Image (tube, grey):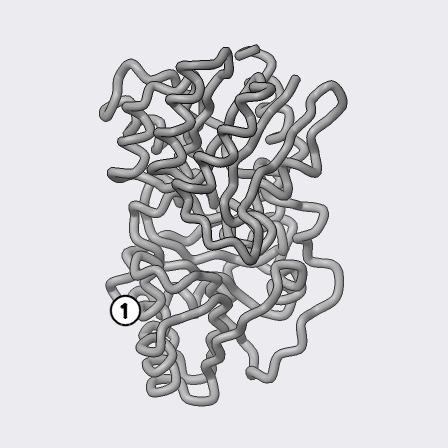
């Protein structure tokens, strides 16, 4: 079985989709040949140009399954390719609830992968005829665990961790404001942030704030060096792999109260409206003392272990070919 994955940024960016591709590729078993196609680092190709060139090369020997992961032109051109050749098209709902994945749904792929049941419910309202399969994004529980090396930090404990990019829907300003109400707490934000966010952090927290950029290979060490994880993302965020990484590392998590986050953190998560800063800050404080048994949090993450997820993908691929 030949599977072609188109992932424009793989190899030079380590975000959610790219990490997913790496983990998936490492776990594919015998009798399945998976090839990842990504843009060369020094190339100036746009996603559209990259897709056109890659698909033209694949036309010489069409794969059994095509998985384009960067949406828009890539999804559309992949659909045209699968009209012309006997290749099955799989699109994944990594963009989240909104126009991008609505477009993907109306391309009528051979299968649309939903990350959560909540996303599947939404997808049915967008295109009732779309063929859906729910497969969560897995977490590497062998790597993200309580035991192991800790990243050296200069912040004073207790340390609250937020792993997020600069996207406005991550709402990092809310956790800065919440921690500012807690006199002895420090805040570590991992991931590139805007100047405005860092200015707010320095203004409200001073030396209790740090914005850290680390390689993905060091991220597990960061989780072990802190006391609590929080992510105040808006309700339309597709997933939240950092939540599972934190749980696998044995950390309590405080997150937005919405169906997607509840699927991820289950009964061990603390849920609230992060826009209520007073409630948010108190929840962070109280969560440190809820449960000292890190295995309780880790057991929730084990439900999303890649050892389980890879079998779901392989079963899906076999069902389509």
Which of 90 and 42 lies nearest the eye of the viewer? 42
Residue 297 visible? The answer is no
Q: What residue is drawn where x is 27% and y is 69%?
A: 277
Tell me the SS state at disc 1.
helix
Q: Quadrant of residue 259?
A: top left
Q: Which residue is mark 1?
A: 277
Q: Is residue 101 left or right of residue 310?
A: left
Mark 1 crowdedness (10 Å alpha carbons): few <14, some 14-19, many ≥20: some
Q: Quadrant of the C terminus?
A: top right
x, y percent for residue 90: 46, 24
x, y percent for residue 77: 38, 29
Q: Disc count in the image?
A: 1
Q: What residue is drawn where x is 30% and y is 61%?
A: 168
Q: What residue is drawn where x is 26% and y is 39%?
A: 98
Q: Quadrant of the N terminus?
A: top right
Q: Is residue 95 above or below residue 243?
A: above
Q: Quadrant of residue 231?
A: bottom left
Q: What residue is drawn where x is 58% and y is 36%?
A: 303
x, y percent for residue 53: 49, 36
Q: Is residue 243 left or right of residue 114?
A: right
Q: Quadrant of residue 13?
A: bottom right
Q: Is residue 296 above or below residue 129?
A: below
Q: Is residue 72 left or right of residue 158?
A: left
x, y percent for residue 6: 52, 36
Residue 118 visible? The answer is yes
């Amino acid at each position: 079985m030949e599977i072609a994955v188109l992932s424009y940024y793989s190899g030079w960016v380590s975000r959610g989709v790219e990490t997913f591709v790496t983990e998936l590729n490492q776990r594919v078993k015998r009798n399945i040949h998976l090839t990842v196609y990504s843009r060369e680092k020094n190339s100036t190709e746009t996603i559209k140009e990259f897709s056109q060139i890659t698909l033209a090369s694949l036309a010489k020997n069409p794969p059994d399954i095509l998985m384009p992961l960067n949406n828009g032109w890539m999804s559309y051109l992949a659909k045209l390719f699968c009209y012309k050749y006997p290749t099955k098209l799989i699109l994944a709902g990594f963009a989240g609830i909104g126009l991008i994945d609505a477009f993907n749904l109306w391309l009528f792929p051979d299968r649309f992968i939903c990350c959560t049941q909540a996303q599947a419910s939404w997808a049915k309202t967008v295109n009732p005829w779309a063929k859906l399969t729910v497969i969560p994004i897995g977490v590497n529980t062998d790597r993200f665990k309580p035991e192991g090396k800790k990243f050296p930090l200069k912040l004073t404990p207790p340390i609250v961790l937020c792993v997020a990019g600069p996207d406005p829907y991550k709402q990092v300003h809310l956790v800065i404001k919440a921690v500012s109400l807690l006199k002895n707490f420090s805040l570590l934000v991992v991931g590139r942030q805007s100047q405005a966010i860092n200015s707010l952090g320095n203004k409200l927290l001073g030396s209790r704030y740090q914005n850290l950029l680390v390689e993905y290979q060091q991220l597990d060490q960061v989780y072990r060096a802190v006391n609590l994880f929080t992510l105040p993302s808006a309700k339309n965020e597709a997933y939240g792999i950092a939540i599972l990484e934190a749980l696998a590392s044995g950390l309590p998590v405080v997150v937005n109260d919405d169906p997607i986050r509840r699927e991820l953190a289950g009964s061990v998560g603390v849920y609230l409206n992060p826009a209520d800063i007073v409630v948010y800050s108190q929840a962070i404080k109280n969560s440190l003392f809820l449960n000292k048994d890190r295995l309780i949090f880790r057991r929730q993450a084990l439900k999303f272990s890649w050892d389980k997820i890879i079998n779901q993908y392989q079963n899906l691929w076999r069902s389509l070919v």
